[in-house]
Amino acid sequence: MEIIDQDLYQRTQALLEPGDIELNGIILHTDLSGEEEPALHQLTLDTGDRIAEHHPDIAPEDTYVYSGNDDSDFGVNQHQGLALDDEEFVWECQQLLRDGHYAVVVYYEAVVDHDAVVAAAEELDHVEHVVGVRGDD
């Protein structure tokens, strides 16, 4: 695994530090500029679907996205995937503009098949490089 942005990797690791649940994450380095919000939005949805596909208890059709636009306590480029029935946490992401292109940091419960999510994310449109980040590293 090649780490392109060491600072971003370390910040992502800090997000995964022990809390109420164990987390893993991915960093998606994209070819998307600040002018490509619709494609960034679709990438976020597609990434969340891939995470849900590999969650042992939740299917993509049983999730929805809660966005920063919906809540003043949330950042505008911060989104959560939640389960429909009980609003259980599935994933959360932050979209960061770095060096003119978006990097999307996504973290999710460690019960999700991490290697499968990394592989699935590598196949998404606009993704140039994926870095997997394990919470237990």
Image: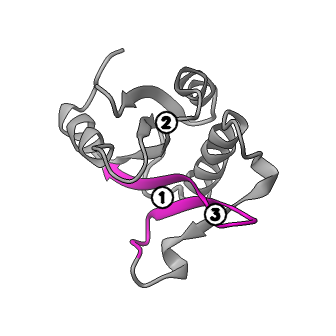
Query: Mark 1 highlights which residue?
Result: 35
**Which residue is more in the foreground, 126 or 116?**
116
- The image shows residue 9 at horizontal and vertical percentages of 26, 35
Task: Return the x and y of residue 111 as percentages of the image width and height.
Answer: 56, 35
Residue furthest toward the front? 20
Q: Nearer the viewer, residue 136 or 48?
A: 136
For the C terminus, the quadrant is top left
Label pair 3/1, CB-CB below 8 angstroms: no
Magenta-colored span: 74-97
Residue nearest the viewer, comparing 97 with 9:
9
Color scheme of the displayed model: one colour
Q: Earlier in the sequence, mark 1 or mark 2?
A: 1
Tell me the residue at 21%/37% (across/down). Answer: 10
111 left or right of 50?
left
Q: Residue furthest bottom?
A: 72
- Residue with the mark numbered 3: 65
Give the mark toward the camera: 2 or 3.
2
Q: Which residue is mark 2?
A: 110
First in sequence: mark 3 or mark 1?
1
Q: Position of residue 60 (x, y in %)?
A: 76, 48
Viewed as shown, does residue 54 lie left or right of 136?
right
Which residue is outermost to the right?
61
In the image, what residue type sits under mark 3? Val
Horizontal side of 54 relative to 60 (left or right) equals: left
